[in-house]
Image: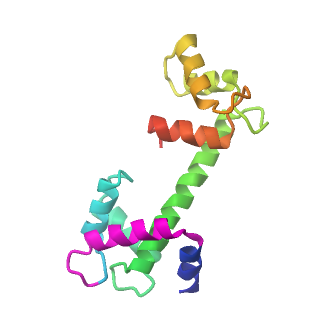
Amino acid sequence: KTKVKDKMDQLNESELNVYRATFSLFDKEGDGTIGTSELRSIFQKLNLGDFSEEEIQVMINIVDLDGNGNITFDEFVELMTYQKVNEEDEMKQAFIQFDTNNDGKISKEELKSAVRKMGVVIDDKELTAMFQEADIDNDGGIDFEEFKSMMDSANFN
């Protein structure tokens, strides 16, 4: 229980209110729990992924502290923060793949190389525009925060 309490303490009031509202919206029976079909609806509506009932059950099992097969609000917060941490880790791994010289920034050449490795055909003009849009502070490199913004706006994740 303290693990969940620690995670809840790390969230700001606005984040907690969003989680509460989301949980309440999908707690159809009003019993304080959400099952697999309800959780699947949440993920679909929030564009977090289209998971099968089996995949959702696995997620529930990860955070289901009381073992009842459903999740309570505390368990829901645990799941949502777990999902957030995984996305951040995936984003860091992608950034490392782009930043081939490991200087903490993606150069225009590194971006060009990575985009081509992904099989995307892009001309230099489009690449320059993409790079300039992503390089928010105009320092000639895309740092991790700028990379996250670029990926979020392009819906790559």
- Above or below, 124 relative to 56: above
Q: Position of residue 117 (x, y in %)?
A: 57, 26
Residue 43 placement: quadrant: bottom left
Residue 18 falls inside the magenta stretch: yes
The total of numbered circles placed on residues is: 0
Q: Position of residue 81 (x, y in %)?
A: 51, 66
Rendered image quadrant of residue 53: bottom left
Q: Nearer the viewer, residue 2 or 17?
A: 17
Taking depth in this image into account, of 96 and 28 the one nearest to the observer is: 28
Q: Residue at x 62, y 38 (%)?
A: 146
Q: Is residue 67 left or right of residue 104?
A: left
Q: In terms of secondary structure, what is the magenta stretch mainly? A: helix
Q: Is residue 32 left or right of residue 122?
A: left
Magenta residues? 10-31
Residue sitting at 55 percent across and 69 percent down?
11
Residue at (56, 19) in percent of width and height: 129
- Viewer-proximal residue among 15 and 52: 15
Residue in the image at 71% along x and 26% along y: 107
Q: Is residue 28 left or right of residue 77?
A: left
Residue 137 magenta-drawn? no
102 to 66, vertically: above or below: above
Percent x, y of residue 125:
55, 11
**Residue 150: quadrant of the picture:** top right
